[in-house]
Amino acid sequence: MSVQTPERAEQIVLFGAAGDLSKRKLFAALYQLECENLLTQTTRIIGVARNEFTDEEFKAFVVENLTTFVKTGLEDSAVERFVARFEYLKLELSDKESFKSLADSLNPDVMTLHYLATPPSIYGLITEGLNAHGLDNANARVVMEKPIGYDLDSSKVINNKVSRFFEESQIYRIDHYLGKETVLNLISLRFANSLFSTNWDHSSIDHVQITVAESVGIEGRWGFYDQTGQMRDMVQNHLLQILSYLAMEPPTDLSAENIRDEKLKVLKALRPIDKTNIHEKTVRGQYGKGHLNGSPVPGYLEEEGANTESRTETFVAIKAEIDNWRWAGVPFYLRTGKRMPCKHSEVVINFKHQPHNIFSESYAQLPANKLTIRLQPDEGVELTVMNKVPGINSKLEIRETKLDLSFSDFNENERVIDAYERLILSAIIGNQSLFIRRDEVEAAWTWADSIIGAWNSSNEPPKTYAAGSWGPVSSISLIARDDRNWDE
Ligand code: BG6
């Protein structure tokens, strides 16, 4: 049976072309694809927004943002080729008729990527507008940014609106963590190395820690963030996706459906957390004022535009458990927060202790092996092993040694690829494996909603932590109760 290669998109329509995501990420990512010759000669990019731009003004706007956000510097000839692809269309998204001009400018026979870089509340309007002029045909794909909803019900409303016109196979839901080199590397690490694949379960692993720490606060996004909080902003998507990659069964192959089927099983096997166990399994915090890099920073309730009564969490720690054969008895401790001491994301796989210690002269308790996967920055993988201390000493002394594989050591001249470059390219070539399927979104919301509901009904405010610290003290107790501690 011959496998049909999906058609490559050669028309990219960027809804929200004047917005923050386009300015910071999307223009730069598309520009890098240009530099790598990954856009075909005939690829067009149509910017859509409400602003008044001529084509020339829009091109100047693109260049201005490339200058600000492309860290590697710009190459004149590539910029020239790149901006020549751009056109601009002013559309009133609530007026279906205004989509006619888009339909007139697109070639219906060419695969088109509609990138919705707009608030999710208008995804429905946009897809209706596309439908009104036949732009929801088989030659179309839609890319949707997170958040897909605010909870399970609102995610269904958004997904139902879009799926009236587009099949699931045409919908690409972004979680930009899946485009990160190190997150994708979790799949190679686990399934291309028998050393790990044969030791990846409850018989060898004691527990797993996932930390995603950011030093930034809410960056002027009070309105959005206060409605959202760290659970919805980071855990429901990014942390659960990392957890799914770590915990899933080996997929039969790398196809989108097989990978997503396995991730879904993990999300469905997460033990529910509700009001009966919320105190034991979770900690939520909110940063107060503190210091970062030696400078004072305001607390969450002192941020610009703040409502001083807000109980929104900026830090979450959770003891997650997966009720399946592989992971019975192995907790996954998740921790994420804003205004932590530094930007630092990592996964630590803590292996079990040896059953008996014959090296008590070196260690009263033999340290267990630890695999640390540094997601960002300073990407790399580190394995702690016990090694003999060299020398003629008659005692067999041992010590902990680190095998450190820093990505920068073997990719010295390689530019770090931004997640959006990989994701846009995947959507262009029609590979859905790095995008979230609807059932995954719903399983993740089901678990997250139960936690948020339990917090709301407990009526307890989040615990305050000083900006620049690793979160509330109770997050240390969460793991210390199990006789473990966070890896610092
Ligand atoms: C986004 C969140 O999805 O991810 C932000 O909305 C967060 O609040 C950001 O700062 C973190 O992404 P990264 O790639 O910088 O780790």
Image (cartoon, grey):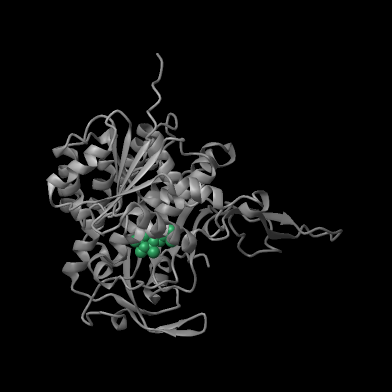
How far from the left and from the top, in percent, is residue 437?
29, 41
Q: In this view, does 234 lie to the left or right of 447?
A: right
Is residue 330 at least partly visible in the picture?
Answer: no
What residue is rendered at 18% in x and 68% in y? 456
Image quarter of the N terminus: top left
The relative height of residue 292 versus residue 478 in the rendered view (above or below) is below
Quadrant of picture, ligand 1: bottom left
Relative to 477, is 77 on the left or the right? right
Q: Which of 224 and 251 is in front in this view?
A: 224
Farthest residue, direction right: 392
User: Picture coordinates of residue 136 (x, y %)?
Assistant: 21, 35
Residue drawn at (25%, 79%), measured in percent from left and top?
A: 305
Farthest bottom residue in view: 296
Q: Based on the displayed image, in which of its 4 quarters is residue 23 positioned?
A: bottom left
Looking at this view, name the residue that lies furthest to the top.
1
**Vertically, is 123 above or below 397?**
above
Whole-percent x, y for residue 268 in the image: 28, 44
Of residues 393 and 222, the one nearer the viewer is: 222
Q: Is residue 381 visible?
A: yes
User: Front-most of 329 and 287?
Assistant: 287
Q: In this view, does 286 lie above or below 386?
A: below
User: Exactly how many numbered labels are in the figure?
Assistant: 0
Give the x, y percent position of residue 432: 36, 37
